[in-house]
Image (cartoon, helix red, strand yellow):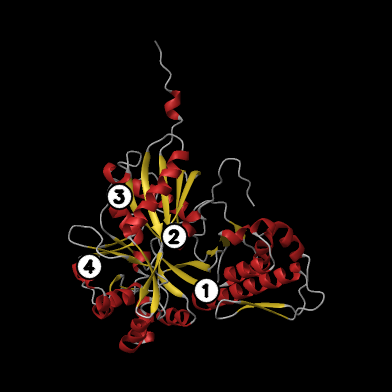
Amino acid sequence: MKRNFDWWLTVPDLLVGLDVGTSSVKAAVCTAEGQELAHGSAPLAWRTVSVGTALGTETDPGQVLSTVRAALAEALARAPEGQVIGLGVAGMAESGVLLGPDGRPVAPLIAWHDGRDREQAARLADDLGEEEFAAATGLPLGTQWSLTKHRWMREHDTRIERAVRRLNVGEWVVYALGGEQASEYSLASRTGWLHLRDRTWWEPTLEWAGADRSLLPPLVQAGTPLGRAAPDRAGDRLAGAVLTVAGHDHQAAAVGAAATGDGDVLDSCGTAEALVRTVPAPLPEPAVVELTRHGVTVGWHALPGRLSVLGATRGGLLLQHVLRLLGRERADLPELDRAALETDPGPLRVRLADDGTATISGAGRDGTPAAVWRAALDQATAELERLQQIMSAAAGPYGQVVMTGGWAHSEAMVELRRRAFGGARRSTAIQAGARGAALLAGQAAGVRAPITSPVPPMRTPGEESS
C-alpha cells in the first residue's frame, strides 16, 4: 500500500526568540525565514526593598526563569507542529546574576534602574575621571551600569563573596536552559567593564569594582552557538534546540525590525523612547566622548563589526501623561490623531519637567484636546530631532528610520516622524526584539547565514503592511 507522506513536508523547522524585558518577557515562534507564527508573554515581577534610607528594586533570578518558561509555554502552545531547532535570548542589559560554585544564584537580581549605587557612581568619577571612563567604555557616568552596583554589593552584601561567575540576564537564561556560560559583546558593552576599542575586559574598572577577571566568562558575538537546550531544564518541546545569546534587547529589535543597514535607526517608541543607530566600527575616540557628553552611549552591536549608538528621550512618557490628562485611552488614538494632524497648536506648548510631570503653557480659550495632543506630539518629535542631530554630528548621516513599540501605533506620531526625518516606516514585526532573537538563533543553528546586511522585513499571514 502506498503511503502519503506529503503532510511531513508541511511541518517546518521552528526558531524561538525571547526578549527578557524589564516589565515582561516576550516570546516569538518563527519559521527559518523569519515569519512570526505565534507569540507569548508574561509579566516580570519586581519587589521594592529598603536600602539604607532609600528604596531599591530587585527580583530573584529564579523568578526571571519562571517568567521565561511561562512566556515560552504560551508561545509554543499557539505554534504549529514542528521541531524547534534554535532558541535565542535577548533582553535587558546592565542587570546581572551572580552564581556560586554550584552554578546557582547567590544574590538577588538588582534592576538596572535601581539607584542604590549613587554614591559609588560619584566615587567612580573621582577615581577614574569622567572622560577617561567614557573614552574607554563608550558610556557616560551614571548609576545604570553594572560596575557601580557590583561595588555597592561588595560594600553592603556579604553574599557576593560566594560568587564565582557573573552573567547578564540573557546569558543567565541561556545557561539555566542548559547552555554554556558566555558574555555577549552588546551586553558586555553595558557593564562598564568592557574596553570599547580593544573588545576586552578593562582592568581599571574591574579592579575598581572589586571584580576578578575570572568572574566574567569568555566574550562571544551574538548568534554564537552555546550548546543545546536540556529537556530537564527547557522542556521536551525545546530539547536539543541550539541556544544562543542574542544580545541587548534594543540591538535584537533592530535585527527583528530590519534596521540593520549602516546608518539605519531603530526608533523604539516606548515610555522611554530610544534611538538605536547601527554604525560601522570603529568610531573615533573624540566622537565617542562627545556623544557621552550628551548622554548617548556607544557599544558593540549584536551584529559583527558594527557599533550601536544609543540615545533616549522621555517623549513617550510625555505622551503617556498627556493622554491621561486628556482623559483618553489608547483606543481613542485614531480619532485624536486625525484631529491633531488637522490642528495648529499655535502658542500652546507641552513640556515634561525634570520631576516627570507634564506642564502646559500658552493655552487660550481656543485650546482643544486635539491642540494639546498635537503640541505634545510636536515636542516629542522635536526632542528626537535634537537627539538625531547629536548622533549625526559624531557618527555621520543616518539612513532609514524604522519605528517599533507602542507609540508607533499612533498614526499622527508616524506622520510627524516621516516629515521630520524625510521618511520613516513602521516595522511589520509584531515583536521585533523576540523576532531578532529568533533570527540570531537561526544563525546559531546553521539554517540562516550570518547577518551582515539588512534583514528583509516579514509579515505574518494576512497582516497588512503600513
Horizontal and vertical percent position of residue 299: 40, 70
Q: Residue 142's image quarter?
A: bottom left
Q: Residue at x 52, y 75 (%)?
A: 391
Residue denoted by label 1: 396
The residue type indicated by label 1 comes to: Gly
191 w.r.t. 15: above or below: below
Q: Amino acid at mark 3?
A: Leu
Q: Which residue is mark 3?
A: 177
Q: Nearer the viewer, residue 287 or 412?
A: 412
Element under label 3? loop
Give, as a three-letter code, the residue at label 2.
Gly
Label 3 or label 2, whichever comes before in sequence order: 2
Q: Is residue 245 visible?
A: no
Q: What whole-number distance in Å separates the C-alpha atoms at marks 2 and 4?
A: 24 Å
Residue corresponding to mark 4: 215
Query: Mark 1 and mark 4: span between their CA atoms?
Result: 37 Å
Q: Position of residue 437 (x, y in %)?
A: 42, 53
The vertical placement of 122 against 339, above or below, is: below
Residue assigned mark 2 = 21
Asked if residue 101 can be seen in this view, the reply is yes
Q: Amino acid at mark 4?
A: Leu
Q: Earlier in the sequence, mark 3 or mark 1?
A: 3
Label 4, secondary structure: give it.
helix
Name which of mark 2 and mark 1 comes first in the sequence: 2
Lower position in the chain sequence, tag 2 or tag 4: 2
Q: Residues within 10 Å of mark 2 (few under 14, many from 20)?
A: many
Q: Position of residue 31 (x, y in %)?
A: 46, 42
Q: Residue furthest left?
A: 101
